[in-house]
Image (cartoon, helix red, strand yellow):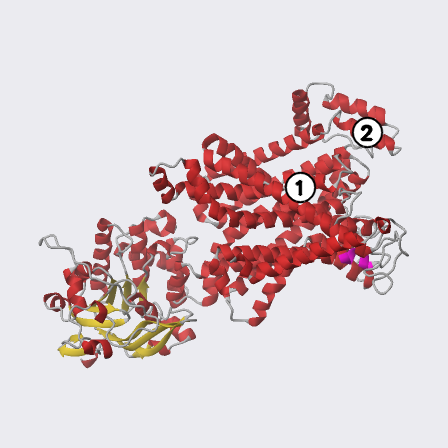
Amino acid sequence: MAAYLRYLSTRAVLWLVTMFISATVVFIVPHLVPGNPLSSVFSRLAAVGGSLNARELIEQYTKMFGLDRPLWQQYLSFLAQLARGNLGYSISSFPSHVSDVVLPSIPWTIGLLSVTTIFSWVLGSVIGAVVGWSGGRSPLFQALVPVALVLYTVPYYIVALILVFLFAFRWQIFPLSGAYSVGLRPELSLTFALDVLHHATLPALSIIVVSLGWWFLSMRSLITTQKGEDYILLAEATGLPDRHILWRYAFRNALLPQATGLALSLGHIVGGAIITEVIFSYPGLGWVIYNAIKSLDFPVIQGSVLLLVVAVATTNFIIDLAYPLIDPRIRQAGRE
Amino acid sequence: MLLRNRKFLLGASIILAMVIVGIVGTLLTQPELRRTGSFPVRLPPGPGGLLGTDALGRSVAIQLSEAILQSLQVGLIAATLGTFLGALIGFVSGYFGKAVDAILRTLTDVFLSVPSLLFLILIASLVKGVGVQAVAIIIGAFAWASPARQSRAQVLSLKERTFVKLSRLSGMSSLEIIFVELMPNMLQWLGANFVNAFLAAVLAEAGLSLLGLGPQREMTLGMMIYWALSYGAILQNLWWWWLVPVLTLMCLFLALYLVHLGLDEVSNPRLAARG
Amino acid sequence: MADVMKPILDVRDLRVYYHTSRGPIKAVDGISFSVHRGERFGLVGESGCGKSTTAMALLRLIREPGQIEDGQAHLDGLDIFKLHGEELRKVRWNQISLIPQGAMNSLNPVMRVQEQLADIITIHEGRQPARELRRRIATLLATVGLPARVANLYPHELSGGMKQRVCIAMAIALHPRLIIADELTSALDVVVQRVVIQTLLQVQEQLGTSLILIGHDMGLQAQLVDRLAVMYAGHIAEIGDVGDIFADPLHPYTQLLISSVPTIEEKKHLQAIPGLPPTLLNPPPGCLFQPRCPYAVQRCRVETPLPREVRPGRWVACHLR
């Protein structure tokens, strides 16, 4: 038990450090641009003929974030604000808070990402295990390998483009954009749920098609390595049935590196999903960021980035918590 | 030996072919032809205009030749910066150990787990309107984490290996030892990392451009897609406008992947035996 | 009465070849031997002589590109090389089990000892009441000298010697007729070796199982087995009673092997056998030991010696005997 707690605290520290460093980077970046970090944004806004509230905004910001005070004080107040959940004001929809702009989009992104990721990871692992275990014996299975090899290198948004073109434009099976049909009110009903699913299909498919390939190949390689292990040989010698050895011996041992792989690729998955949302105008955080970029709403960009980083770090931490359940050796390890 | 590996050769030739297309295309076209309105708008590929024209009257083929070179340039600059920065950080971390290692290793882990695209978005959104090289440098500045981790692992494993300890007995300084022993492996390892970083950089540029954070004044593969989407290419059925850069990108990924596989096989001959 | 006299295992002309792109590697090239009921049979030879391959062949664990090219192995009358699928699976472990060479890595890292043992028992004997199972496993562990709490541990929580003993417990779990112990103690230090060997021998006596002990240490084999087979380059050089062989080794290779064993009692030169074992890829004609044999004659270079029973219970494969 003590070893487990030691392990937990190490991972918790890493979690805190990640968030801390990310917050620092997010803070520092605007200050890298010479001059008052936000004035450059404001001046560009003004040049485009922007908000009439510019002066009011600048005053609010200067006061809230102490832009007239030394850097380290600004940093501290920045952290203090973050701790309170205050991400600042949105420029383009002032006086709305950044959180007001960003919060409604979170469920859409989380919904899309969690469902697609879990689905591809589980299904890809299962299929990969079956194919890897069968060795070269089944030509049907082996054909999947080059398919996966081609698929997994392609970014989600490229698959998205092709899917949108074929299934939404050419053959109008799925909608072109949005999370639900215009005019429909969000409510807890079957019609709404089906509508949401209908709209989410193409975005989800874009991610799933590519991710499946990756998890499939990864598990296949892990299972192939397992086949050479001594305990698999002995298991066969003891007269255990083939399928039993695959799932209870080989697969269980391959799960840990597969889970590690999941944790390591979370950043990449999130990055790809962001851009995919843009292709579909799917109202998640990616869409929010895209619009904020168009309207030069930097605080929203900043807030969204921070939120996403926190989400990824936290998910990583949760996966870390789950490791010992999968692999008993970790319970002893404590440190890496 | 590398030059005899089929996968490597195939991948490298594809990239070479693209470079040639890019150079030839750029050299052959007069600058005026690049301006909007030089061609009739919205022509599909065919006898009219090679790969077709876009909604602004520009030739897709001409754009492509410029885009290929610019995207490759981004990959090159970013990969070089990222790989060497990463190798250096990893080396320092592994060689000096203790406190330095603890700090750098934690930093590396953090940057590995965080979606680097997000930081890229953050920076790029502040410096909108910069050129291709600046975008490349920004991407490269965040590409160090993966090579750093690997470089550190290499240095650590070398420190432990018996022959290093033996060499130390023979009087070489440990720095000399590590360099001399690292060098032969280094090239292969650097190669693989470089190719990975190249691929990631081209991907990152495409992603940034799609979001509107790309080098607006120059043409890259990502920017081509961006313009296509901005002008509603999908809805107007101007499929060639976005499909051409998409296919080119996929070609490039495939080629880089083949090069990577080739490098892997050469450094680990057991893989080649099965292939 | 006659049944008791029939050997528990009868191997005839076993050949195991590994098919490579450059030709077949004849890892085992025509060996025959028998193991009697309840006896301890030793199979000794240097690395690469084919002894482990023989063990793998008997358990039908030879994998591509290797295959059992020829031969029969009758386990109590049943030709185990002719079994496939379900029949093979049933015979495995029930009738013939293995204590593997690398016990370090032979236990599933993500399963407790209890679960692995239970797995084997339930697969072969069907579902068991939990309490029965636990008791049975505790008894098994006690037989190999391990406390009952080991059942709840994971392999990585056990020492090398403990893991090896768990493997012994696994091997005896279904009371097989024949146990093959492959290099039982190679990876252990001397003190632990002794404990493990004692455990195995005790168990074997208790159960009356027949035992094949595979190893490369002549000195160790001498202390453990009843009868011994000496293997060289995929062939059997000599078979016989262990005392007989040590008192009067007939094959030149056996003689050299015995004289190379260091002893505390006698001060003598450490003698190594000059030369290297031959390549098993397209081996040359004639006796394979001939290049290193001090007594080789012309006939040895041309004609492969076949094992002959020169005395009751003594076989030698040498032209000079």
Q: Residue at x 54, y 40 (%)?
A: B87
Question: Mark 1 and mark 2: span between their CA atoms?
Answer: 26 Å
What is the chief secondary structure element of the magenta stretch?
helix
- Is residue C153 part of the magenta span, yes or no? no
Residue pointed to by mark 1: B139
Secondary structure found at label 1: helix
Q: Amino acid at mark 2?
A: Phe
Q: Tell me residue B69's x, y (percent).
A: 72, 50
Tell me which chain the residue with mark 2 is part of. Answer: A
The percent position of residue A33, horizontal first and vertical second, equals: 73, 29
Q: Nearer the viewer, residue B263 or C41?
A: B263
Q: Above or below — where is A38 with respect to C269?
A: above
Image position, residue C65 (x, y; %): 42, 70
Tell me: residue C137, above or below residue B159.
below
Q: The disc labelled 1 sits on which kind of residue?
A: Ile
Label 1, residues with CA under 10 Å away: few <14, some 14-19, many ≥20: many
Q: Is residue A249 left or right of residue C147?
A: right
At 62% from the left and 40% from the top, the residue drawn is B81
Q: Which residues are magenta?
A: B239-244
Q: Residue at x 59, y 68 (%)?
A: A143
x, y (%) of residue A193? 75, 54
A326 vs A303, nearest the viewer: A303
* Quadrant of image for the N terminus of chain A: top left
Circle 2 residue: A42
Quarter assignment of residue C58: bottom left
Above or below: residue A10 compared with residue C86: above
Q: Which mark is residue A239?
A: none
Q: Report which quarter residue B15 is drawn in.
A: bottom right
Looking at the rendered image, the disc whose residue lies closer to the viewer, 1 or 2, is 1
Nearest the eye: B79 or B242: B79
In the visual, does A179 lie left or right of B264?
Answer: right
